[in-house]
Amino acid sequence: MSQSNNSTIVAKFGGTSVANFAAMSRCAKIIINNPDIRLVVVSASAGVTNLLVKLGNEVLSSNEKESVLQQIRNIENAILNDLGRPIKVEAVISQLLEQLAEIALHPLLVTSTKLKDELLSFGERMSSVLFAEVINQVSGESLATAFDGRQVLKTDSSFAKAEPQLEATKKQAEQILKPLLDTKVVITQGFIGQDNFGNTTTLGRGGSDYSAALFAEAVDAFALQIWTDVTGIYTTDPRITDKARPISEISFDEAAEMATFGAKILHPATLIPAIRSGVKVFVGSSLEPDAGGTWISKDVDYRPAYRAVALRNEQTLLTVKSPEMLHATGFLARVFAILAKHKLSVDLITTSEISVALTIDNPPNTPVAALLDACVNDLSSFCDVNVESDLALVAVIGNHVEHDDNKGGAGRIFSSIGEDKLRLICHGASEHNVCFLVKQENAKDIVRQIHDYLFPA
């Protein structure tokens, strides 16, 4: 697909970027100063989604529900007050808050994924309406309009983790969204979509980046800008070491590895539509829009052996062992069939003659723990199973890292941190990473050690 004649930019602003009136005003100036930004995707204002999740997942009394609802009202009303409570906008927000309260009190909410998705949509729906008004007030003209993205982003009915329907989304974008972009800056919602029956769906937590990339693909955008609270992608998390350096450009392959292995700047799925459609991606800070950022694209000028060190916490190591593996066929297929049954995805895997070790992402307060217990129970029927937790996954990201003779290769990385601290090593499956499992308590120190070794000051 050629995009040489299209300068359309899709911009996505996360929760902290639209947290309040001051933050929204900063973001409004970014949009006003770049006429190529025609479509804007917003998250819920910071804190709102967590409150909605609490309403949907916890059994609360009427008073407790009212307390949570009031906290949401306070966030939305504070922005509304700073806008001067324009009549039309106030009417829309009031109606949305009333609908939200009605769903929050529904007796089946906690057990219905369909109702939960409807509930979770309100944060984005309210922030998009408020943000459009902020842009119009800051610009002094009727520049922006709020648009219900559910009209375009079509999905299946897998509530809480809906899969987008690309052809239907593209068709809707061509028919009703693209024509709007010629006359208005369109403000829409991340994270939410709609199934074929008109039900609201969500793409899962962190899905706003993903939906922004889907919108960029659907409107044939030239670029996708993701505005967050950090100035681009760094060689590692700056909170771990002050020696972390900003990266000006990075390839899709490297960025995908970083997103997969714990760099929280991008949702792992974000790059899939961008890679598919060739849309360039920019990551920058809405707090410092002139401070630069990171461009992610298919072709980059510089591909170093080592680009970054990523860390993903809350990993579980599952080791299955059985003499049946020895010279037998079908054992691994049986193991992975059970993992698939329980919808558990594996990150790393190593095998020996009679055992298999594999890692599973196991963040707290998620359904994974219960699924893991059920999976272990099934596996125990035909093999010995050992479960280890409190582990972290460290990934060294780069290009042809397994062939880096100049720096001594991966062997020197491992020897520099001491093999006694390593629980599992996965090396050679990809030219873009070397991964290993360490104890959670040692993880940050090990990341600092490796980073200082690979990126000396």
Image (cartoon, rainbow, N blue to C red):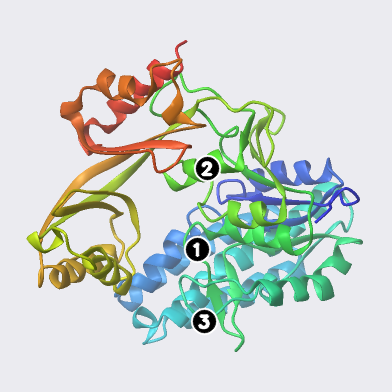
Residue at the outermost top position:
457
The answer to whether the residues at label 1 and label 3 have Cβ atoms under 8 Å apart is: no
Could you say whether the residue bearing mark 3 is in a helix, strand or loop? loop
Q: Residue 188 got which mark?
A: none
The answer to whether the residues at label 2 and label 3 have Cβ atoms under 8 Å apart is: no
166 or 131: which is nearer to us?
Answer: 166
- Is 231 situated above or below 413? below
Q: Is residue 431 left or right of residue 81?
A: left
Mark closer to the chain start, 2 or 3: 3
Measure the C-alpha gap from mark 1 to mark 3: 27 Å
Q: Is residue 434 left or right of residue 375?
A: right
Residue type, numbered disc 2: Ile
Q: Residue at x 36, y 87 (%)?
A: 107
Residue type, numbered disc 1: Ile
Can you give x and y, in whole percent of width and height, for residue 39 in the image? 77, 57
- Is 292 situated above or below 37? above
Question: Residue 286, located in which quarter of the rendered image?
Answer: top right
393 or 401: which is nearer to us?
Answer: 401
Q: Residue at x 30, y 74 (%)?
A: 341
Residue type, numbered disc 3: Ser
Measure the C-alpha gap from mark 1 to mark 2: 26 Å
Return the residue at label 1. 72
Closer to the observer: label 1 or label 3? Answer: 3
Mark closer to the chain start, 1 or 2: 1
Q: Residue at x 56, y 42 (%)?
A: 253
- Is 452 situated above or below 369? above
Could you say whether the residue bearing mark 2 is in a helix, strand or loop? loop
Return the residue at label 2. 265
Return the residue at label 3. 157
Mark closer to the chain start, 1 or 3: 1
Residue at the outermost front position:
327
Can you give x and y, in whole percent of width and height, for residue 128 in the image? 68, 62
